[in-house]
Amino acid sequence: MQRTEIKQSDFEALPLDRMDAEKIAGESTSYWKDAWRRFRKNKLALAGVVVIILLGIMAFIGGPISGQNYYQNDLMNANQKPSSEHWFGTDNLGRDVFARTWYGAKISLFIGLMAALIDLIIGIIWGAVAGFFGGKVDEYMMRIADILYGVPYLLVVILLMVIMPPGLWTLIIAMTITGWINMARIVRGQVMQLRSEEYVMASQSLGASNSRLMFRHLVPNTMGPILVTLTLTIPSAIFTEAFLSFLGLGVPAPLASWGTMSSDALGSLQYYPFQLFFPAFFICLTMLAFNVIGDGMRDALDPKGR
Amino acid sequence: MARYLLKRIGFILISLFFIISITFILMKAAPGGPFASERKLPPAIEQQMNEAYGLNDPIYKQYADYLINAVKFDFGPSFKYTGQEVTDIISRSLPYSLILGLEAIFLALSIGVLLGVIAALNHNKFGDYIAMVIAVLGISVPSFIMATILQYIFAIKLQALPVARFESFAHTILPAVALATTPLAFIARLMRSSMLEVLHADYIKTAKSKGLNDRVVTYRHALRNAIMPVVSYLGPLVVGILTGSFIIEKIFGIPGLGNEFVVSVTNRDYTVIMGTTVFFSVLLLVSILVVDLIYGFIDPRIKLSGKGSK
Amino acid sequence: MKKLLEVKDLSISFDTYGAEVQAVRNISFHLDEKETLAIVGESGSGKSVTAQSLMRLVPMPPGKFVGGSIIFDGEDITQKSEKQMESIRGKDISMIFQDPMTSLNPTMTVGKQIAEGLIKHQNLSKKAAHDRGVELLKLVGIPNPEARIKQYPHQYSGGMRQRAMIAIALACNPKILIADEPTTALDVTIQAQILDLMRELQDKTGTAIILITHDLGVVANAASRVAVMYGGKIVETGTVDEIFYNPKHPYTWGLLGSMPKLDAEGEELQAIPGSPPDLADPPKGCPFVTRCPYAMKVCEQHMPDYKELSSTQKTACWLLDERAPDVEPPESAIVGGTEVHG
């Protein structure tokens, strides 16, 4: 190092007040801003969001733009290959696969979102109450949840589908009747952990009521894991719908879902594989998109996790 | 230990009681009697049939009979296949499902763990990316789609393996792979994140600071600790394999228990539905207990005692 | 005395998300046989990275040696292969870590964890390693070692786990023991026991110790020489007496000021204001400039050279330049009322 360049004048003291205002390195960012910044960096998760948005748009305009409808039988034109008229071809009853695919998208997405939403509402209320009151209340509520949780989800759904009249809402009710438990457990865990934290005690000592505490302080602070669970519930609901439809327990005809379409196409797999390809491809794409979004959200909301 | 076992078995019995009761209520609530659908029977004959199956008894008597029979594991005859006992159907179809299920569990565990370890050891490198792409795809492709893809490629196009049925080991390959796909992918992800966490643990540094080589550190110290979450996933794994078998056995035309269950559901064959449901529940509850016992043996920190809830 | 280990101009960086964090920058120090050298600094000063680099335990990547050398037994550790390192780790140099709760493998008995190193380095049979393990547990003061050796770490208390860690580290009679904050995670009463144990064992075995700590109280008890680290650099080194009674660096003054003293009743502890520099973008001059109440213009631009104040004390501070104004250390940095000559 060259020491000659240092002059006597360099030995003047720096003003002391430079230390008074502690410089805060970098701008202070809130939890959500920070999470959003991390999420944005995850290209795969962003691509997932784009895919879901596109699927959502196509679910509404896909049918109309093809000029075909999803229920019209046309046995003369059954089992056609994709063409300029029938973009994805036709199925064994001559129905337009393109229109059916997007109609199916509407049904599948609706079921996924609805099931997730209902799970969320029941799960939050149940979990928040159990976690907040703790003690005996918690023990009994969670014991009930445990017993329900011990029964395999799909088994229950199938049994319920047997006794209820077939239909869209039957499917959704069957799925949510035990589906909320997972959410309730996560909310409860979060609430239990947060309940002991200081700002809750501070608020309590200031005389905030229980319901105010629960919904103003606790629930917003448990949003991270809840959002992740929600995102991952959607693909599992879509999967369950497809699974049931594939078994012939799904939405009744003429309603179309990706599951029923796959099931219908199975018989002629050897001769018309493309009939299976489209619904199967979109089931996988949707599940993939929601899964990468869920992963991305988990990474973004929980910086510790890898 | 004995106390723990007793407590757990008691819990299983309570759960079973609930499940048996709920299935009974559900089946009673089902629309239409078992003989109401399909062919219209003359009222006199239907009356006779109801009598024979005890359906004219008051509901509490039916429930009591059902409970007693369930304890004896006797679910009576099938409604649809005359002359066949439910227990016969179960014991006939179980071996197929058992072989298939065990094969799938073996596949999911061995390959899933392997993929997860490879990914973690090559963290953020090529091996990691490949393993995780496989895992994400595995989770996103439902088993029934996987099954049809496998059928199409290996059976129809390549004609390398049989399309369906269950006659030899070769027949089990495709269904076992399809059944294993989702849990395999899940295990791979679980194993990866757990392994990454363990590899950063202090005791791994301790092991390295003793001069042990990487292989010993990885296998003797890291793996045993990292595999814990996978062991606790064994319960859900059994559930997944079981429910997966409903659809896979249907697609591959395997006369297993899952297929039998689905057929009974579409046929509204109530005695078979109830019998298989109860059987599945016993199977699951027992296997979850076994998994917990295994866990207790692997992890010295877990004491299997009757006290406290787990 | 013979130099056992010599670190020369060592620099270590970490590649993280596009930035290069220069955790250790150009540090030099040495370790004599049978002595205890304390490396003192706050978290993020680079002391733990330095310690781990001596055994090449810094994960690489993301870490990397940027320059310098670590000479042990006449050979440069930074140049050795992984295979060669394996025969040094645990045999010549071993290490104990901060948190005894997490530094033992929870699924392996303590006995097996002790035996591993013995089997590897001394070719002992399982039986012989087990017997030696019992001896070692007895040596580190664990009662009923024959039974304890078969137990798992969770059956030990915190203090006992750290004792077991010491037994593992000393199993093969290493020449150097690196103790990375060995008492930080322990209760105060246990801390003293562990320090006493280390000193006692050092007397018996003659192992040289590098003690990494942020606690000057621990240093006073245990070390013979001290290196003070700040911002990835060693800012001052000296014997314990020199550092405590004749400190010359304002950061050392700050550390001493923030240490509770027995004879200074009622006096407030002096915290050092501000936070350590961002090592992804380290300051051009002295790293302490942003928090130093005596900083001068020159400090911002130029890193000071080390000034040898005695054969053992070296300090890097511009205040020691003849052109700098005379500055007296603050009241709070004066230990035990001894007059500080300056």
Image (spheres, coloured by chain):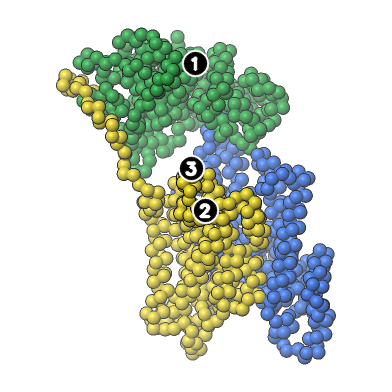
Chain colours: A yellow, B blue, C green
Check disc 1 and give the amino acid type.
Asn
Q: Residue at x 45, y 23 (%)?
A: C215
Question: How far apart in space, not on screen, are marks 1 and 3 (Cα)?
Answer: 37 Å
In the rendered view, tell whether residue C324 sits above or below residue B228.
above
Q: Which mark is residue C221?
A: 1
Q: Residue at x 44, y 79 (%)?
A: A99
Q: Quadrant of the N terminus of chain A?
A: top left
Which chain does tag 3 point to?
A
Which residue in the structure is indicated by mark 2? A210
Mark 1 vs mark 3, foreground winner is 3
Using residue B6 as the reference point, say whether residue C331 is left or right of it.
left
Whether tag 2 and tag 3 are in contact, CB under 8 A, the answer is no
- Label total for image: 3
Q: Quadrant of residue C123?
A: top right
Q: Quadrant of residue A98?
A: bottom left
Check disc 3 and give the amino acid type.
Glu
Which residue in the structure is indicated by mark 3? A198
Q: Quadrant of residue B227?
A: top right
Check disc 2 and give the amino acid type.
Asn
Please tell me if label 1 and label 3 are on a single chain. no
Please tell me if label 2 and label 1 are on a single chain. no
